[in-house]
Image (spheres, helix red, strand yellow):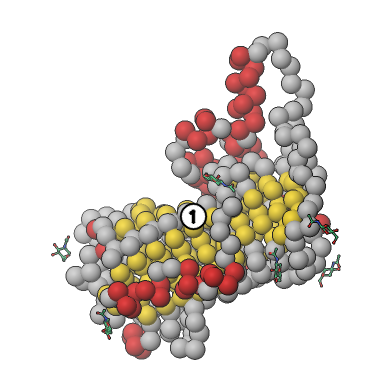
Amino acid sequence: MALIKGISLCFILYAIFVAFVSTNNLSSLPIISPLLIPNNIDRQRKHRHHKEETKTSICDDFPAGFPPPDTNTTSILCVDRNGCCKFTTVQSAIDAVGNFSLKRNIIWINNGIYFEKVLVPKTKPNITFQGQGFETTAIIWNDTANSSHGTFYSGSVQVFATNFIAKNISFMNVAPIPGPGAVGAQAVAIRVSGDQAAFWGCGFFGSQDTLHDDRGRHYFKDCFIQGSIDFIFGNARSLYENCQLNSMANPVPVGVKSINGAITAHGRASNDENTGFAFVNCNVGGTGRIWLGRAWRPFSRVVFSYTSMSDIISPEGWNDFNDPTRDQTIFYGEYKCTGGGANVTMRAPYTQMLNDTQASPFLSTSFIDGDQWLEPFK
Ligand SMILES: *[C@@H]1O[C@H](CO)[C@@H](O)[C@H](O)[C@H]1NC(C)=O
Ligand SMILES: *[C@@H]1O[C@H](CO)[C@@H](O)[C@H](O)[C@H]1NC(C)=O
Ligand SMILES: *[C@@H]1O[C@H](CO)[C@@H](O)[C@H](O)[C@H]1NC(C)=O
Ligand SMILES: *[C@@H]1O[C@H](CO)[C@@H](O)[C@H](O)[C@H]1NC(C)=O
Ligand SMILES: *[C@@H]1O[C@H](CO)[C@@H](O)[C@H](O)[C@H]1NC(C)=O
Ligand SMILES: *[C@@H]1O[C@H](CO)[C@@H](O)[C@H](O)[C@H]1NC(C)=O
Ligand SMILES: *[C@@H]1O[C@H](CO)[C@@H](O)[C@H](O)[C@H]1NC(C)=O
Ligand SMILES: *[C@@H]1O[C@H](CO)[C@@H](O)[C@H](O)[C@H]1NC(C)=O
Ligand SMILES: *[C@@H]1O[C@H](CO)[C@@H](O)[C@H](O)[C@H]1NC(C)=O
């Protein structure tokens, strides 16, 4: 584990991402993927110290007696791509969960890359994906809007169930990065359409439309979210705390004014909807020149608070989707942000610099009614 931890955050997944998009060739991946299995590293290290020891099975280091038996409130379903426990795919474990379970069903997923398109149907609430670290455990697929009858169906993972939790795992779409003006190349890593979902220490990797934060109340803590255009989009009511938002839009040369990406495209369609994206204590960086958000629908609502932003954020900050009638109805707020990208001198006129009272609804888990459903991380 020490070796893995020594490698900088996300480097491994990023390397895979780059390798995959540049070759779009599944068979080139296993060259990299053994790096993702700390067991292999542990084994090599052991071999150096105990040369006489001969291991015969890749599962020799798998913890004995795992998973523990069910309790009245919890079942653990074990997934290991090398076949060291009951399931080798995430979907087969989901399929084994009964409909409308009142227990929490923890799908424990060992280190590795799981190449599969995964669906958590409406009939399966209370599922947890427990990975071993977002740098080492990932679910990856490569559908696009074209290959899946629309952006909304392109997700590598699609969650329609309520009470979904994910911890320490990455969701990735490795479809080719679209060139300028490409059509039908949107590629979602995960679609979250169930109410009351929580993500702790997760990674989200894609380019256009990475995270489809579709519907319901959602919580994201300590997550890494990467993309280029509209890479967090949808009409959910979500709180993002302590997340790293990493733009991979093309760099823009000095003196060129073009904008080539946006972090958010929130889809609030009317004043009656209690939806919005609230970012607190986040960090915005990466490449390109991008907007904090653009108004996918007229009542789009996004607030950034206590967030540090590099100068990849364009001086006007936000975009009304080239529809000035939306300037009256969008709600784009900023509160106590820092960094070169947070200079508000040139901000679009409809941007709201919030005072303490105005900002307070967007600063805590009360924004997503957390007291009604959000369990503390354990
Ligand atoms: C996904 O990857 C597979 C294997 O490389 C390839 O055959 C398929 O065309 C890709 N799909 C898309 C939509 O790019
Ligand atoms: C995929 O990668 C493998 C190994 O790198 C190589 O042998 C093979 O020719 C590649 N296939 C395609 C379609 O590029
Ligand atoms: C689990 O449920 C059974 C049957 O309802 C009950 O007898 C048992 O005491 C429960 N065990 C615990 C630990 O709550
Ligand atoms: C679960 O619900 C689905 C959809 O309603 C149904 O097709 C399936 O048979 C159910 N499974 C079980 C085990 O009852
Ligand atoms: C399971 O789901 C039901 C319905 O969504 C919910 O009422 C219940 O609290 C959940 N239980 C657990 C353990 O998450
Ligand atoms: C998740 O990962 C973090 C840091 O990588 C670690 O501190 C934490 O114990 C892990 N927790 C779980 C439940 O996986
Ligand atoms: C998607 O399909 C349209 C229409 O067939 C085509 O023009 C476009 O190039 C396709 N996009 C990609 C990324 O394959
Ligand atoms: C903010 O931007 C304005 C206009 O570009 C510039 O004059 C000013 O020096 C900047 N302020 C800071 C603190 O960088
Ligand atoms: C915040 O702004 C609102 C709207 O302009 C105003 O009514 C309120 O008095 C302000 N509150 C503080 C604490 O400045």
Number of marks in picture: 1
Indicate the position of residue 69 as horizontal and vertical percent values: 80, 47
Answer with the quadrant where ligand 3 appears in the image.
bottom right
Tag 1 residue: 223
Label 1 element class: loop
Q: Position of residue 292 (x, y in %)?
A: 36, 67
Q: Position of 54 compared to 136: left or right?
A: right
- Any part of residue 182 in sight: no
Q: Nearer the viewer, residue 317 or 182?
A: 317
Residue 65, quarter of the rendered image: top right
On the question of residue 272 being in view, the answer is yes
* Viewer-closest of 299 and 279: 279
Percent across and percent down for residue 377 are 56, 55
Question: Residue 154 appears in which quarter of the rendering?
Answer: bottom right
> On the rendered image, what quadrant is the N terminus found in?
top right
Q: Position of residue 163 (x, y in %)?
A: 65, 66
Q: 317 and 307: which one is in front?
A: 307
Tell me which residue sits at (26%, 57%) in the image.
Answer: 339
Residue drawn at x 70%, y 54% as measured from the top left: 106
Along the horizontal axis of the image, is 294 left or right of 5?
A: left
Relative to 61, residue 270 above or below: below
> In this orientation, which residue lies closer to the viewer: 262 or 251?
262
Specify the farthest residue to the top. 52
Residue that appears at 43% across and 84% down = 298
Residue 126, compared with residue 18, is above or below; it is: below
Going by the numbered disc 1, the residue's amino acid type is: Cys
Residue plotted at (37% across, 74% down): 360
Sort mark 1 into few (<14), some (14-19) or many (20+) by Cα contacts within 10 Å.
Answer: many
